[in-house]
């Protein structure tokens, strides 16, 4: 009888050790590191000036070169419904980019939509193009503070 109990105890210990030996991701506990996206663009520009808009994507400090979808949404203050979605191209080293020219003066919002590794992030940055009134700038700044909350989520 002692031999059976010892054998069961050894089997239980081996099974427990084998289950714990499986690798976990960077944060442990089965939770993936958050996806991070940093917009690389100027704060100001002139109308019709060709600008390079880019976003650097990382996860857990590592560059993400396998994003499934990266787009830039661009709209003029108070006119998001007439904005445009533009596909970015992978430039390497976790950077996705495109070239864009803003046609007229005004405050524009640039929001990237990055999907990678079953995660999605949508940071926003404003760009003042040409002459921007103080009222337009203050109004858009208030709107974007509301937009900046709760934009990171799992797909």
Image (spheres, grey):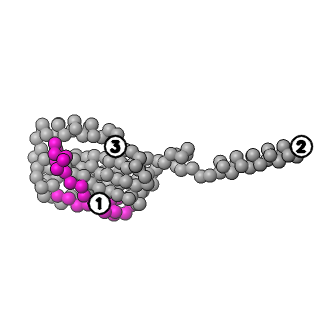
Q: Nearer the viewer, residue 135 or 18?
A: 18
Q: Which mark is residue 88?
A: 1
Quarter of the picture holding the N terminus: top right
Q: Nearer the viewer, residue 131 or 74?
A: 74
- Find the distance from the CA under tag 2 to the CA under tag 3: 61 Å
- Dot 1: what SS? loop
Residue 148 seen by the camera: yes
- Find the distance from the CA under tag 1 to the CA under tag 2: 69 Å
Predominant SS along the magenta part? strand
Mark 2 residue crowding within 10 angstroms, few (<14) / some (14–19) / many (20+): few
- Find the distance from the CA under tag 3 to the CA under tag 1: 19 Å
- Dot 3: what SS? loop
On the image, numbered disc 2 is attached to which residue?
A: 1
Q: Earlier in the sequence, mark 2 or mark 3?
A: 2
- The residue shown at (34%, 40%) is 150
- Dot 2: what SS? loop
Q: Which mark is residue 122?
A: none
Vertical relation: 29 (above or below) 71: above
Residue 46's spot in the image, x, y percent?
13, 53
Vertical relation: 138 (above or below) 50: above
């Amino acid at each position: 009888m002692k031999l059976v109990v010892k054998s069961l105890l050894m089997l239980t210990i081996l099974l427990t050790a084998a289950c714990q030996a499986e690798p976990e991701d960077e944060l442990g506990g089965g939770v993936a590191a958050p996806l991070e996206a940093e917009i690389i663009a100027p704060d100001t520009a002139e109308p019709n000036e060709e600008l390079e808009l880019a976003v650097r994507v990382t996860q857990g400090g590592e560059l993400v070169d396998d994003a499934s979808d990266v787009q830039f949404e661009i709209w003029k203050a108070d006119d998001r419904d007439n904005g445009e979605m533009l596909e970015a191209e992978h430039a390497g080293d976790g950077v996705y980019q495109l070239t864009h020219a803003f046609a007229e003066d005004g405050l524009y919002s640039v929001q990237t939509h990055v999907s990678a590794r079953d995660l999605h992030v949508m940071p926003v940055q404003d760009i003042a193009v040409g002459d921007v009134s103080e009222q337009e700038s203050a109004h858009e700044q208030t709107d974007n503070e509301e937009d900046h909350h709760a934009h990171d989520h799992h797909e």
